[in-house]
Amino acid sequence: MTTNDSKLTKKDFTSDREVRWCPGCGDYAILATVQTLLPNLGAKPESTVFISGIGCSSRFPYYMNTYGFHSIHGRAPTLATGLAITRPDLDVWVVTGDGDGLSIGGNHLIHALRRNVNIKVLLFNNEIYGLTKGQYSPTSPLGAVKKSTPMGSIDRPMNPVSLALGAEATFVARSIDTDRQHLSEVLTAAYEHKGAAFVEIYQNCNVFNDGAFVALKDPNQRDDNQIRLVEGEPITFGPDNENAVVARGDGTMKFTPTEKAGDRVVIHDPKKEEPTTAFALARLSHNPVGPTPIGIFRDVERPVYDELLRDQIDKAQSEQGKGDLSDLLSSGNVWDVVN
Amino acid sequence: MPYHAIPRDAEGVTRCASSRADRAGEEGNSSMSSTVSGDAGERTRVQLSSAVVRFAGDSGDGMQLAGDQFTNQSAVAGNDLATLPDFPAEIRAPAGTLAGVSSFQLHFSDQDIHTPGDAPDVLVAMNPAALMKHLSALKSGGTVILNTDAFTSRNLQKAGYDEDPREDGTLTDYQVHEVGLTTLTVRALEEQIESGELNKKEAERCKNMLALGLVSWMFSRPISETEAWLDTKFAKRPELAGANISALRAGWNFGETTEAFVFHYDIKPAKLPPGQYRNITGNQALSYGLVAASVRSGLQLFCGSYPITPASDILHELSQLKRFGVATFQAEDEIAAVGSIIGAAFGGALGVTASSGPGIALKAEAMGLAVMTELPMIVVSVQRGGPSTGLPTKTEQSDLFQVLYGRNGEAPMPVIAASSPADCFDAAIEATRIALTYRTPVVLLSDGYLANSAEPWLLPEVDDLPDLTEVFSFATEEDITDGEFLPFLRDADTLARPWALPGTPGLEHRVGGIEKEEGTGHISYEPENHHRMTALRHERMDRIADDLDPTEVHDPSGEADVLVVGWGSTEGPIRAACHDLRAKGRDVARVHIRHLNPLPKDLTEIIRSYRKVILPENNMGQLVTLLRARTLVDIKPYNRVTGQPFSAGELVEAIETLGWGESS
């Protein structure tokens, strides 16, 4: 990651393009947070690249005064992989959504995560197809009555955090569009993570799926439902931390009144090599309508793909010498014809 | 004797040879043209102009390996040559079945040749299935070497023989040598088996080397190169190297000492242009061409690919060339492969992805994105039989329309086709030149035949290769005008847009698949802008055509009124057929097209100037449709899709009929 001593501001990361999301869209809040955060992290506009697929969220690069690539549906992680491999000097971000990243592009997402390519993936989850005007998405709840599901969705929704953990991701987190402070903390950790970072951001689509995350966002409910994961702290929630997360004998987790939990309260450790605990936390909530963990589920170190690839090139060059084209062409059986 | 040899009909051989003597020195169908000369006595050395040898056996019999080595020996002997490997798609079909037969054909000559030969003069059949599958291809009077050990009743049954072909007259028209190749091999390795160095199965597996040794003796090929190769290949298992070398020598000695083989043959070195040569397959030449383009442009080569027959060798080859800074990435699928090279191209690398028809279909949308974002990269399509999975290991030219038109919207891409295995090297460099000069993705077409076939290649001098640093430069801060960088402001001549790499301060910009405003590159839905941008993307193809060399017309007499047009891998057979036709007194001209998009500008005029124009293709008439539309000339197609390249013989017949026949 690049560092910078000069004082850059949000303005330096803001392009001159008019932002064209629907008024009230959660994307505005995420954009403002990212534009404010990057200069504070020491990022440089010229060394930052935002790559997106197709969907409302994928318009994001146009509004960043950085390098940007608005690619095709679901394929952003593939472009990001090719760029990150060949240009280790850059900060490569992928912006995707629940349709782009989990449906049409699901394959690329899981492979980019398992390879641990040095990219930061922001998945804006609004549980709906917005750009195509309101069809159910891979994260819409069962029974969702949408344009293409007049009798209710019969697709079991996907849990993006579970998927990322299952795909061997080394950094997995979740945050909320309008919680600027929490989102900034999570994105800072993602930026500082070496390798692939996956951040699910609950994002409200006020036109086609308004209120999907009300349980976590409404001031009257959020304290009851946000389970904030903090490294080294016991996992409790509720206005007075009256609820706790404890482990069952089979490794799964459940909620218990804190007073009954005693020392069985799970202490959050995202650095655990084994993803089992992180996975159990992800399974506490399949849809964010009740108590749901937010924060960093997993943050472990593993060799980064593009570094391993460059190491092999370096090794080949140090062992065999830098390639000589003439030698290559005349390798193998060669004979001379003299006339 | 462990074998049963049918006494050789010496007169038959002489007759067989003399009947072809009139074709000595010619190209095409002719081979085994001979002059009996040399040492009288037990052994007669026969001077040949050329010969075609086919090794056929089970997939596990090592036929490709034997063929490769025979090819190397012939190259070292200075012959011109062309090869045709042919293997099943199944990795290991049931042993002894027709489905499992793998073959390798080599045509070698003291003349300049362009095809792997039509009918073989010598067939080595390692089992009944190989005989069943390949005997009909053999020339009448040709030589068959049978591994008689494999002719068990069970194997005969598996091959579909009701009667033993050795006894029922099937082989009457051929010179047959029944040799117990397996028995001889085991016998040659008796010591190693007894000492426990090898088990019997390992020993038997060396029988391909025994067969190779025998054929090497028949054609006076030096076996020292093969010995050296075996030493290297089995460096970690010297006992296997030793066993294979013993089998190879035993085969040679068997020919030398057995009276069954009255003749052996000699083919003088071909008179090729002077210089240093090596053998090369199409996939290897293509890979080297990409590396050469990387070296000559100073750009890092990034290959993102997904395994697919017959293109995988390119990924394999490049993955071994990391010392050239080459980065290879085996993607999770074809789409990811092309996506990764678009990302790499955006970052300033020379991106290449190699695939075949089914994979190109998956890449289509992303190739459109590459057209829209105007980034240089190479998409290699090694065509195979289609549609769908089709014939994975067989050749075809049926993906021309796919690469020309298989994308949504008006999405023109330059298309370049290689015409011979060695030409894949030059075609790769030319594809890169166009990609970098005009800032566009380019399709490089090869096919299954070129990919796996080999030919001698006159090595180029590295300094003579095009200097690709001259054709492009990266944008700098100097490209900022009036405080603004315009990522879609084009070069007046090439219409190339600036290649502005992330990391360059002040040039931050966004690209993508949505239509862009000319100049600024901002999203634009303005009607006239879209028409103008579409026209510009087409206009760029015209600019490429403006810069192409004049089309070369091959018309030695200058009198021809019949023109044969070809593209891609048909050049060898078309060239051979035209040669044979001219020898028969038919004046015929030919043109071979390398640039399929844009087409050369002088092509229409050339085509319109002939009485008859004929276009053979290994598809159902793709280029012919295009050229008829463009030239309004009633070009006559000749189309076959057998999974095999054309033979020169069938083209002679087709061209003669279409050019001079009654209906013509």
Image (cartoon, coloured by chain):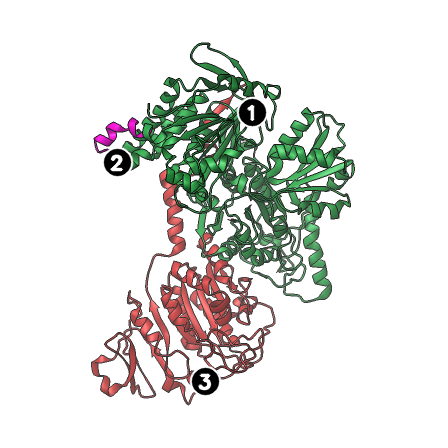
Chain colours: A red, B green
Residue that carries the numbered disc 2 in the rendered image: B199
Callout 2: few (<14), some (14-19), or many (20+) C-alpha neighbours within 10 Å? some
Q: Which residue is mark 3?
A: A214
Distance between the Cα atoms at labels 2 and 1?
41 Å
Q: Position of residue A147 (x, y in %)?
A: 56, 79
The residue pinned by badge 1 equals B31
Compare residues B566 and A106 and report the one nearer the observer. B566
Q: Are marks 2 and 3 on the same chain?
A: no
In this view, A191 is above or below B436: below
Q: Amino acid at mark 3?
A: Val
Q: Is residue A31 above or below residue B48?
A: below
Which range is magenta? B185-199
Q: Judge whether residue B38 is colored magenta.
A: no
Q: Chain of mark 1?
A: B
Side of A120 where B173 appears, left or right: right
3 vs 1, front mark:
1
Q: Tell me the quarter of the image containing the N terminus of chain B.
A: top left
In this rendering, the label closer to the viewer, 2 or 3: 2
Name the amino acid type tagged 1. Answer: Ser
User: Disc 3 versus disc 1: distance between alpha carbons?
Assistant: 83 Å
Horizontal relation, residue B550 to residue B451: left or right: right
Mark 3 surroundings: few (<14), some (14-19) or many (≥20) residues within 10 A? some
Q: Position of residue B508 (x, y in %)?
A: 56, 60
Under mark 2, the amino acid is Asn
